[in-house]
Amino acid sequence: MAFTTTYTSGRQEIAFSASDFLDEAISDFLESGANASRFASSIVKLATGVELLLKDLLEKICPALVLDKVDDAGLQIAKAFNLEKRLRSPKEVDNLDLRTAPFPTLMLRVGKFYDIEAYVGQLTRLHKIRNSLVHHRGKVDVLETNLLLVKYVFPFIEGIGKYDKTLGLRISSATWKKIRQLEAQSVDVLTSQLAKKIAHHSSLASRLSKQKVAVLARSEVEQGSRNETVVEDNLRCLACGNDTVSIFQDFDVDYDESGPSGGYFVFSLRCRVCGVELDEDEIRQVISNFGAYLGGDVADQQQFWEQAITPPDMDESY
């Protein structure tokens, strides 16, 4: 964790580690939902944390490996190796900033000692996305970045943390479980967005007390519009795990210049505990891989999901 040093003069210094940034970055990502600012924050912190992680790996081999260049007087080396007391004038390094190597150089050096070839391209991409955010009017492809993080960047961080526990990454096993679930479910744009939505609402639900969950579970189902009706209720929620999901049916009409041109049914899903909402495409995605999203213990519910989004036969109305 961040380490604070307080001097007799009252001045304080805070030293940050890779884990400080990575812990917050992963939390920001899992809880960002549709919050663009928090999503951007997670990217910047992730890139910063990964860069510090690479430096930590190199420093464990030799502190000089993190330096960009060695100055003629060797003061950079003296500070990197904590040799200040051996200098004739130790104050020379008091205000000396260690000029560390740029990210591409760090990647190259780490690759000489660790097998990270499978991640070089993806970590470089993360660094470029970070740069696009912190520079003028940066833009980020949200879905592409979601896939990049869950399929490559997070597995890299978890793997390094397991390989070298002395790095002090404090990310819980429960968090890594959520990340692995995201990775397993994120095979394309739709599933990536859905997996992140599930993780977001799962995190929100985990902070609710048992009493609050009980109150929400007993609450009345709220309709989103006057024409919306509940076609299935009390299904297992794929985000919070409570039997508090309702599937709704609504009706919409298309118009052209002459007036109404056709109508169609619209289906949606909402949980009254965690608040997760799915549209019809997302509901169909869940149904197509029901066991992966909801587990085998509620496999018998799949038929109710399928029946709920089957449009009624309008011919029977005439």
Image (cartoon, helix red, strand yellow):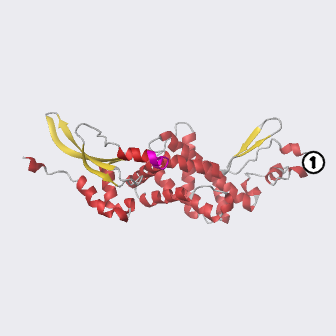
Percent position of residue 299, x then y: 32, 63
Mark 1: give few (<14), some (14-19) or many (20+) Cα within 10 Å.
few
Residue where numbered disc 1 is placed:
88
Residue at (42% x, 49% y) in the render: 197
Relative height, residue 144 to residue 223 (above, below): below
Residue 150 location, x and y as percent?
49, 56
For residue 213, say whether it is visible: yes
Magenta span includes 209: yes
Q: Residue at image x 19%, y 51%?
A: 311
- Dot 1 amino acid type: Arg
Given residues 168 and 304, the one toward you in this image is: 304
State the predominant SS element of the stretch in magenta: helix
Mark 1, secondary structure of its residue: loop
Relative to 181, is 244 on the left or the right? left
| Residues drawn in magenta | 204-211
Front-lying residue, 269 or 197: 269
Where is residue 7, by image quadrant? top right
